[in-house]
C-alpha cells in the first residue's frame, strides 16, 4: 500500500467512525482476515478496511468518502459467490450488508416485497409463504445467500428453467452509485420510463454500485408439485429424454441430471437410494395447476420410457421429495469426499448439444486421466462439470485446469457461455475474450464508464486483466465453510 | 415540416456504403424530413453507414418498419434515415433449443410465421400491426401475454448492435442462461434508437400451447374490476393474461386468457368463470381488439390521438380506472391493457384541446405515481408534445445521460427523441 492509499483508507475509516458504532468499522488485522474470501476459497485477499453499515444513508456516505479519496470498494453480501466476486481489494474497503436485513414490505395484493440487500433469499419466501406466495429464484445457497448478492450475480437456481432468473424478478433497486449518490432504478410497477439501467446493473457483479433496497416480484405458490426420479443407462438417453420433454411443449419447473460418477458420490455421502446401476438420472419437477400437472406427468413418464428409462420413481410425499432432492443437492459436497480437490465449472450449452458435449467431456477425461463428474441443470444446458484432482500429486492441478479450460472452450464452440449463474468474478475474467470480441468488451466498458468513471467499484472483476502469478481458476480446497456448517449445499 | 440538407460529400460517402435515396413524404420522422434515406442490408452494411455518418458528423435516425416512428419526441435533426427494412432475414431457428435469431428489420409477424411450423412462438403480442422486431425492442411494446412471459426484455438472450461510431458489438449469446458480462440487451430495450442501432436479436421461444380459452365478464365499476382482477390473480388458475377494456363512459370488460393442455385449460377456465360471476362467458376465440392498442393509427401529426402507457402496482387498479373515468366530460379516455401486470394503454381522442390533454396527463400521472408507476405519453399531436412532459419525473436521469454520453458522445443517434432531451 502506498502512503496515498493509506491516507485514503484512514480518511474513509474516520468518516465511517463518525457514522457507525466502533464494532462496525473493522481495522483489526485478525478480524479483517475473516473476510478474506468468498465461496471460492482459493482466492484470498485481506481488505484494508471493513465497514458494516446499517442504513442506505450511511452506506452512501461511506461510498462518497471512497469516491472523494479514490479508494476502491467491494460490496459483500453473504460471501457465498463462487467466482470471487466479493474478493476484497487489498487497498480498499469491503462494504458488508449483513446489518441491512429488514424485510420492509410484503404485499400480497401487489405481489411485491421490498427488502434490504442483506436479506437472505429464503427469508423472502418464508415471509411470503403464509400469503400463498414465494420468491421464485432459488439458488441452492438460498439458506444463506443475500438478495443483494443475487441481484449482483443475476443468480439462478434449479427452478429458473420455468421461472427465470433474478433479472426477471427484480422490479426496482435503490443503488448507491460509485460517486456515493443514492438513486432509484426501476419502480414497483413494470416498465419504468427511460433506459433500463436496472437491467444493466443486475448481473454486473458489484461493479456499478451497491444496491441498498430491492423490490421483488412474488410468485403464487403452485397448487401441485410432482417430483420424479428417473434412471437411465446413459447420459445420452437422459439427454435425449430431456430434449423430448421440452420439444413436447412441457416446461417442467426443473430438469436436473447427474451422471454415474456423481450418483456414486452422492450415494456414498447421503444414501439417497438412487436407481442401482444407472448411468444417469434425471430429477424432474412439474408444478402448476393440478389438472395440468397430472397431464404433463403422464407425458413425461411416457417420454422417459420411450427414451430408455428403466426406473421412474414418483415422490409420494414431501419426505420422498426431499430425499430425491437430497441426492441432487448433496452432489457437489459428496464429490468433495471422493476427491481431495475439484474445480467447478458453470458453462452453458444449447440443450440439444448435451449428448455431444458430454461425450467430448468424457473423451477429455479419459485421454487426460482426469476424472470429471457431471451434475447439472439439464433443462437449460447449464453444466456443472466437477473436475477432480489431488493437489498433493505433482502436476495434477495443472492437468485439471487444462481439462477445465477445454470444457469452457467446448461450451463456447457450441455457441454457449462460460457462466450460467456463478458469474465471472476474478475467476473467469481471463476467459471473457474467448467469448466476446474486443469490441464487445469495449462496449460493455462504456456502461462501466458511465456508472464508475474512476473504476473504484469492485475493480479487477468481470473484465479481463492479466492474471497474477500463482492464480489458478476455480479451485476448491475441501468443502466450503458453509457446507461444513451444513448451511448450504453446492448445487 | 422541417427539412434537412446533407452536403454532397457526406451524401456520397453514405451512398458508397449502400442504396441511398431522397426522402418521400412517408419518410418523415414525426414532422422532420430526413436529408436522405439509406437502406443497408446487413449488420456490416449498417456499420458502414454509421462510419460514414460519423466521419461527416451526420445525425442518424434508425427505422424498422416505421410503425412507431412518431413515438417520443421528434428528433432535433435527422440527416440520415437509416431504413432497416433490408435486414429482414431469419438467421437461425434452432427448434430443438427453442431459440431464434433474426435480423432486426424482420417483421414480428414474419418471425412468428417462421417459427410456427415447429409449433413454436415468440411470446410477444403484435400490438402494433406490421411492427419490426427491432422496433418492438426499441419501444418495448408488449401485450396481454406479458403476464406470463414478460416483455421482449425478458425473452431477448442475445443482441448485435452497431454503435454511433460504427463499431459492431454483441452481448449475450444463443443460450437462455448466461451471466457473462453486462446485459447490454436490456439497456437497448426501450431505448428508442438513441444508444445504438440494433441489427440482430436472438430470442427464447415457447411452444404454442395445445389449447387456449378466453373467459370474459362485464365489470360494474372500478372497484369491482379490481376485486375480480385480484381474485383471478391469487387463484390457482395460472392465467396467461388478465386484460381490461375500459371505455370512457361506463362499464368495462375483464378478459382472462388460459393456455395449456386441453383438459387443464378447461378446468381452469371453469374456475375462472366461477370467479368472474354469472355473466362470464367462455370462447375459443379472442375477443375483438385483443392485443391491440386503444388508439387508431396516427397519420397526420396534427390529428393524432394522444397515446399513453400507464403503469401501477395491482392495488392501484381501481384508482387508475377511476381517474380515467372521472376526467370524462372534457376528456373521454379509453383504457385497455394488462391489469394482471399493471400496464395499460390509454387513448385520448384526436382533436381534444391541448390544455385538456395536459391536465388529463397530469391527473393520470399523479395517480400512477402514487401507485408505484408512471404515465408516459407515447405519441400525440405536435401541439400536445410541445405542451406536455412526455415522461414525467425520472429519478435516474443523470445516470441515463451519462450512459448516452458514453455510447453516443456527439448525440448523433436519434437526437432529442428520448427522455430528458436525450
Ligand atoms: C453452496 C453454494 C451453492 C450455490 N448455488 C448456487 C445456485 O444454485 N445458483 C446460483 O446462481 N448461485 C449459486 N451459488 C453462488 C452464490 O450463492 C450466488 O452467487 C449468490 O447470489 C451470492 O450471494 P451472496 O450474498 O453470498 O453474495 P457475495 O458472495 O457476498 O457477493 C457476490 C457478488 O455480489 C456483489 N454484491 C453483494 N451484495 C451487493 C449489493 N448489495 N449490491 C451490489 N453488489 C453486491 C459482490 O460484490 C460480489 O461481486 C452457490 C454458492 C454456494 C457456496
Image: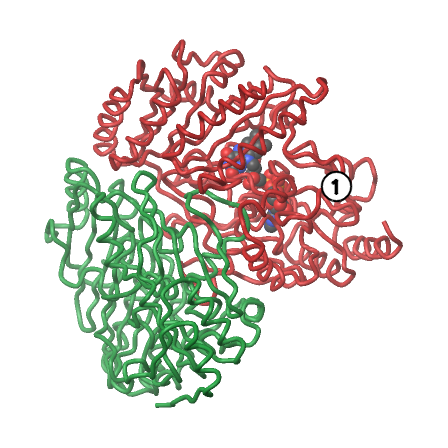
Q: For the point 38% across and 89% down, which residue is it?
A: B3
Residue extending farthest top = A276
Percent of width and height locating residue B221: 21, 63
- Residue A473, position as x, y percentages in the image: 65, 35
Label 1 marks a residue whose chain is A
User: Who's the residue at 29% across and 44% down the image?
Assistant: B206
Label 1 crowd bin: few (<14), some (14–19), many (20+), radius 10 Å: few
In the rendered structure, the colour chosen for chain A is red
Report the front residue among B218 and B24.
B24
Question: Under tag 1, what secondary structure?
Answer: loop
Q: What colouring style does the render use?
A: by chain
Q: Is residue B3 visible?
A: yes
**Residue labelled with disc 1:** A468
Chain B painted colour: green
Residue A47 in the image: state x and y as whole percent. 77, 44
Q: Residue furthest right?
A: A3
**Toward the viewer: A235 or A214?**
A235
**Toward which corner of the image does residue A68 lie, by quadrant?**
bottom right
Can you say whether B80 is above or below B309 in the image?
Answer: below
The CB of the residue at mark 1 lies under 8 Å from ligand 1: no
What x and y, as percent, mark residue B129?
A: 23, 66
Kindly tell me whether residue B365 is visible in this rendering. Answer: no
**Image position of B233 (left or right of A481):** left
Return the residue nearer the eye: B192 or B396.
Answer: B192
Q: Quadrant of residue B343?
A: bottom left
Residue A16 vertical placement versus B221 (above, below): above
- Above or below, A272 against B36 in this view is above
Quadrant observed for ligand 1 in the rendered image: top right
Amino acid at each position: 500500500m502506498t502512503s496515498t492509499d493509506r491516507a485514503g483508507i484512514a480518511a474513509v475509516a474516520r468518516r465511517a467512525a463518525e457514522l457507525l458504532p466502533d464494532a462496525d468499522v473493522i481495522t483489526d488485522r485478525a478480524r479483517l482476515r475473516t473476510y478474506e474470501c468468498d465461496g471460492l476459497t482459493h482466492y484470498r485477499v485481506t481488505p484494508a478496511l471493513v465497514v458494516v453499515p446499517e442504513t442506505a444513508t450511511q452506506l452512501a456516505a461511506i461510498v462518497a468518502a471512497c469516491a472523494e479519496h479514490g479508494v476502491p470498494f467491494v460490496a459483500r453480501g453473504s460471501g457465498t459467490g463462487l467466482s470471487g466476486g466479493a474478493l476484497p481489494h487489498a487497498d480498499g474497503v469491503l462494504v458488508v450488508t449483513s446489518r441491512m436485513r429488514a424485510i420492509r414490505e410484503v404485499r400480497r395484493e401487489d405481489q411485491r416485497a421490498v427488502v434490504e440487500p442483506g436479506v437472505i433469499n429464503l427469508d423472502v419466501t418464508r415471509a411470503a409463504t403464509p400469503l400463498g406466495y414465494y420468491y421464485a429464484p432459488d439458488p441452492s445457497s438460498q439458506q444463506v445467500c443475500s438478495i443483494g448478492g443475487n441481484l449482483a450475480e443475476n443468480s439462478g437456481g434449479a427452478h429458473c428453467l420455468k421461472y427465470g432468473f433474478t433479472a426477471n424478478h427484480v422490479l426496482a433497486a435503490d443503488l448507491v452509485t460509485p460517486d456515493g449518490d443514492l438513486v432509484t432504478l426501476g419502480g414497483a410497477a413494470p416498465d419504468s420510463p427511460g433506459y433500463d439501467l436496472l437491467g444493466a446493473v443486475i448481473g454486473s457483479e458489484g461493479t456499478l454500485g451497491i444496491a441498498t433496497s430491492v423490490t421483488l416480484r412474488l410468485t403464487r405458490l403452485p397448487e401441485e408439485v410432482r417430483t420424479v426420479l428417473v434412471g437411465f443407462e446413459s447420459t445420452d438417453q437422459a439427454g435425449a429424454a430431456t430434449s423430448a420433454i421440452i420439444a413436447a411443449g412441457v416446461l417442467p419447473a426443473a430438469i436436473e441430471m447427474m451422471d454415474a460418477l456423481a450418483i456414486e458420490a452422492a450415494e456414498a455421502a447421503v444414501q439417497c437410494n438412487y436407481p442401482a446401476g444407472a448411468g444417469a438420472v434425471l430429477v424432474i419437477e412439474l408444478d402448476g395447476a393440478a389438472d395440468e400437472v397430472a397431464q404433463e406427468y403422464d407425458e413425461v413418464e411416457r417420454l422417459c420410457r420411450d427414451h430408455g428409462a428403466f426406473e421412474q420413481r414418483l415422490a409420494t410425499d414431501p419426505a420422498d421429495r426431499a430425499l430425491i432432492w437430497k441426492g441432487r443437492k448433496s452432489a457437489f459436497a459428496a464429490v468433495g469426499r471422493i476427491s481431495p480437490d475439484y474445480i467447478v465449472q458453470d458453462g452453458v450449452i444449447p440443450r440439444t448439444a448435451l449428448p455431444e458435449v458430454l461425450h467430448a467431456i468424457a473423451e477429455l477425461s479419459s485421454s487426460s486421466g482426469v476424472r470429471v463428474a457431471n451434475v447439472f441443470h439439464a433443462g437449460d444446458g447449464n453444466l456443472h462439470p466437477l473436475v477432480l484432482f489431488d493437489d498433493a500429486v505433482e502436476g495434477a492441478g495443472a492437468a485439471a485446469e487444462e481439462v477445465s479450460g477445454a470444457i469452457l472452450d467446448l461450451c463456447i464452440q457450441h455457441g454457449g457461455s462460460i457462466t450460467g449463474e456463478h458469474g465471472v468474478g476474478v475467476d473467469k475474467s481471463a476467459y471473457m475474450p474467448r467469448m466476446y470480441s474486443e469490441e464487445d468488451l469495449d462496449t460493455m466498458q462504456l456502461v462501466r464508464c458511465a456508472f464508475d468513471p474512476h473504476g473504484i467499484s469492485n475493480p479487477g472483476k468481470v473484465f479481463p486483466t492479466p492474471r497474477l502469478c500463482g492464480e489458478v481458476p476455480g479451485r476448491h480446497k475441501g468443502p466450503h465453510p458453509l457446507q461444513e456448517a451444513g448451511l448450504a449445499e453446492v448445487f | 415540416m422541417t427539412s434537412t440538407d446533407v452536403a454532397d460529400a457526406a451524401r456520397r460517402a453514405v451512398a458508397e456504403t449502400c442504396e441511398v435515396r431522397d426522402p418521400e413524404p412517408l419518410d418523415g420522422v414525426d414532422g422532420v424530413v430526413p436529408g436522405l434515406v439509406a437502406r443497408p442490408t446487413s449488420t456490416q452494411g449498417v456499420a458502414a453507414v454509421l462510419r460514414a455518418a460519423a466521419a461527416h458528423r451526420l445525425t442518424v435516425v434508425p427505422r424498422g418498419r416505421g410503425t412507431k416512428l412518431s413515438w417520443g419526441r421528434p428528433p432535433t435533426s435527422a440527416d440520415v434515415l437509416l431504413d432497416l427494412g433490408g435486414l429482414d432475414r431469419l438467421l437461425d431457428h434452432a427448434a430443438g433449443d427453442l431459440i431464434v435469431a433474426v435480423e432486426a428489420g424482420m417483421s414480428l409477424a414474419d418471425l412468428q410465421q417462421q417459427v410456427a411450423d415447429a409449433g413454436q412462438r415468440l411470446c410477444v403480442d403484435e400490438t402494433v400491426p406490421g411492427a419490426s422486431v427491432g422496433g418492438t425492442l426499441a419501444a418495448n411494446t408488449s401485450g396481454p401475454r406479458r403476464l406470463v412471459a414478460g416483455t421482449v426484455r425478458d425473452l431477448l438472450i442475445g443482441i448485435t448492435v452497431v454503435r454511433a461510431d460504427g463499431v459492431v458489438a454483441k452481448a449475450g449469446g444463443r443460450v437462455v442462461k448466461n451471466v457473462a458480462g453486462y446485459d447490454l440487451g436490456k439497456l437497448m430495450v426501450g431505448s428508442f434508437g438513441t444508444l445504438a442501432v440494433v441489427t440482430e436479436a436472438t430470442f427464447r421461444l415457447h411452444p404454442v400451447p395445445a389449447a387456449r380459452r378466453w373467459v370474459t365478464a362485464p365489470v360494474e365499476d372500478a372497484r369491482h374490476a379490481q376485486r375480480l382482477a385480484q381474485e383471478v390473480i391469487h387463484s390457482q388458475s395460472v392465467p396467461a393474461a388478465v386484460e381490461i377494456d375500459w371505455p370512457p363512459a361506463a362499464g368495462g370488460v375483464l378478459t382472462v386468457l388460459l393456455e395449456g393442455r386441453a383438459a387443464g385449460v378447461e378446468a381452469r377456465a371453469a374456475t375462472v368463470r366461477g370467479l368472474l360471476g354469472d355473466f362470464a362467458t367462455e370462447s375459443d376465440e379472442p375477443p375483438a381488439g385483443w392485443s391491440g392498442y386503444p388508439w387508431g393509427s396516427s397519420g397526420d401529426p396534427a390529428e393524432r390521438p394522444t397515446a399513453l402507457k400507464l403503469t401501477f402496482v395491482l392495488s392501484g387498479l381501481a384508482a387508475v380506472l377511476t381517474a380515467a373515468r372521472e376526467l370524462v366530460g372534457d376528456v373521454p379516455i379509453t383504457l385497455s391493457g394488462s391489469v394482471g401486470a399493471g400496464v395499460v394503454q390509454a387513448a385520448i381522442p384526436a382533436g381534444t384541446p391541448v390544455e385538456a390533454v395536459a391536465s388529463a396527463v397530469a391527473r393520470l400521472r399523479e395517480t400512477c405515481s402514487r401507485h408505484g408507476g408512471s404515465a408516459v405519453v407515447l405519441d400525440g399531436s405536435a401541439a400536445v408534445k410541445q405542451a406536455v412532459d412526455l415522461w414525467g419525473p425520472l429519478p435516474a436521469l443523470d445516470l441515463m445521460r451519462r450512459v448516452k454520453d458514453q455510447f453516443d458522445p456527439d448525440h448523433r443517434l436519434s437526437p432529442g427523441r428520448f427522455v430528458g432531451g436525450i
